Amino acid sequence: MKVFKFGGASVKDSAGVRNLGEIIKTQGKDAFVVVSAMGKTTNALEDLVRAYVHRQNENTQTVLATLKDFHQRMSIELLGNSIPVDETFAHLDLLLAQPPSAPYDEVYDQIVSLGEILSTQIIAAYLQQNNVPTQWLDARQLICTDITFREGRVNWTETNQRISQRVTGKGVKITQGFVGQTATNRTTTLGRDGSDYSAAIFAYCLNADSVTIWKDVPGVLNADPRWFDETILLDKLTYQDAIELAYYGATVIHPKTIKPLQNKGIPLYVRSFLTPDAPGTVIGNFEQHLSTPSFIFKVNQVLISLRPNDFSFIAEDNLSRIFGRFAQAGVKINLMQNTAISFSVVVDNNPDRVPALLALLKQDFRVSYNDSLELITIRYYDQGTIDRVLVNKKLLLEQKSRYTVQLVVKDLG
């Protein structure tokens, strides 16, 4: 069995859905297909959550109307008069009619997860209408997680059992990325852009022959074309190199995707839905590691520097408190560095979480920070590659290992 994963960019309009259908017809007989929300739907649903939680009723209705119009228009363009998403929107209407009572992250998962439900309902109906035998599956009933909302941790034993029992028979199976469910039937999500991870979960449990992630790029590139005029297509990567690139922020692959596939030796292909006959990149159990320098840019970063209020050293007790505060605020550390009396970290500038984190840290530490920064990671670097990325940049912090350098910089314009 092949597992295919299509992201939001591949199904952003009706032409994209038709292209998906052609790929499945020509390359995906009996494939297990994982699909993200359409286009920018997840962003819109996040706006809806914020408006709903903050009781901005007019804004809530405006965003909701836009979402309904988009999905109804997609349904009409692809299916004629059939609108398979009405029931899901009726459920959302009922949810929004009640005042918010659960914690923000739990509310987020109940609402934002519906983007994938809506997209797969439309796409499954389109495939069926075009003579592709298709079974729609609810990923919430297949992937079991704990109660960590927005970052659900998979219960692999229960998930494996559910998938083995419920995914049977021939024909195309289509389900949602990004979503799961607790043992008490509360919807969870697996982390932003977690549909790649969903595909890996299903591939692992189904002992799939391969996973293909269909993107709007020709494969894994050594740099983001938004930042570099010239990029190199990497035709193959070891699992380890792919893990390292994803961990440091390469957006083409979700960080959690690789390990389940590596554990069973399942190859991962990254290919372009724009040129579906091109080979793309294959990630597998190869002996030769990457030698081409790879560049990863993360923008909108914050450098936070901490010093103990009592002038003590940065030792185990202070480190324990620091990491506890980050866990409490739900903020991930992208880079950290310490001296005897200070500790510096770099994080994404998430407006929903960083202010709360700073307030927590100020209880025990003197806190200073710089925002509007960039974090540049170079894998397999040399001095020439470092000099190249530091043009018109002010270097604030540098960290090197044998194969990787990370640079925290301020753009000088």
Image (spheres, rainbow, N blue to C red):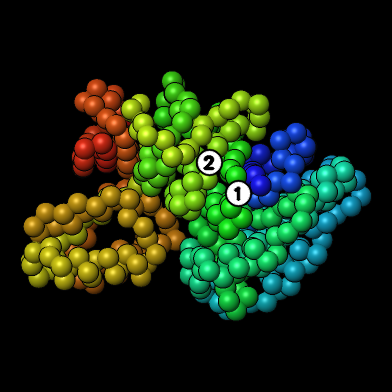
State left or right for residue 29 relative to residue 101: right
CA gap between label 1 and label 2 equals: 11 Å
Task: Give left or right: position of 355 versus 401.
Answer: right
Rate crowding at label 1 as few (under 14), some (14 to 19) or many (20 or more) other CA atoms within 10 Å. Answer: many
Contact flag, marks 1 and 2 (Cβ < 8 Å): no
Q: Image quadrant for the C terminus?
A: top left
Residue 265 versus residue 188 in the image, above or below: above
Residue 118, percent across and down?
73, 56
Q: Which structural element holds mark 1?
A: loop
Which disc number belongs to residue 268? 2
Residue in front for this viewpoint, 351 or 202: 202
Q: Report how many numbered discs are placed on residues in the image.
A: 2
Q: Quadrant of residue 77?
A: top right
Q: Amino acid at mark 1?
A: Ala
Name the residue located 55 percent from the left edge and 54 percent from the top edge: 204
Residue 169 is at least partly visible in this image:
yes
Q: Which mark is residue 46?
A: none
Tag shown at residue 208: 1
In primary-sequence order, the first of circles 1 and 2 is 1
Q: Is residue 391 left or right of residue 224?
A: left
The residue shown at (64%, 63%) is 163
